[in-house]
Amino acid sequence: MQLTRFDRWLREKYAYETHIKTLRAPDEVPRNIKCIDLPDEPGRRYKHLFIANRTKDVDEFLNILRENSQMYETQIIEKNSLFVRIVAPKEKSLTWSIFSMIVIGSCVVFAFFYLKKLFSDPVLRQNMLEALDILKS
């Protein structure tokens, strides 16, 4: 399903986080970026993992890495939590899901009130009872 601009904003704000891997830690790291030292294992290329949630912080950090001529790798990872599954369902648009629920709900409510008004009419009720008597006999 087509994602709306609002859906893309929700995913960027709440569902995605950016992982930046480097060989060495830079001298300065922006305040909102979490740093994790990766264990030394054979074949592991990078030693430090930086996790950022905001694109502004990512851009600032990448500019610092470029200024220091450091090698880095970035990945955009989807967080794994219940809130993310609600806000950004896989291959679905939250906006269109909410819109369809509102439309279907309002149709059900209007149909309920219409049928209630229709069956509260004494003439219709008498005709329905007569029709049931005819069908029974």
Image (spheres, rainbow, N blue to C red):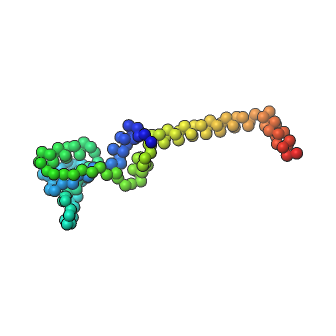
Q: Is residue 53 visible?
A: yes
Residue at image coords 22%, 43%: 59
- Whole-percent x and y of residue 123? 80, 33
Q: Is residue 35 visible?
A: no
Residue at image coords 17%, 44%: 63
Residue at image coords 67%, 35%: 114
- Whole-percent x and y of residue 52? 26, 49
The C terminus - image quarter: top right
Residue 44 vs 76, above or below: the answer is below
Question: In terms of depth relative to the viewer, which is nearer, 72 or 51?
Answer: 72
* Rendering quarter of residue 93: top left
Judged left or right of residue 55, residue 11 is right
Residue 19 vs 128, above or below: the answer is below
Question: In terms of depth relative to the viewer, which is nearer, 124 or 45?
Answer: 45
The N terminus - image quarter: top left
Judged left or right of residue 24, residue 86 is right
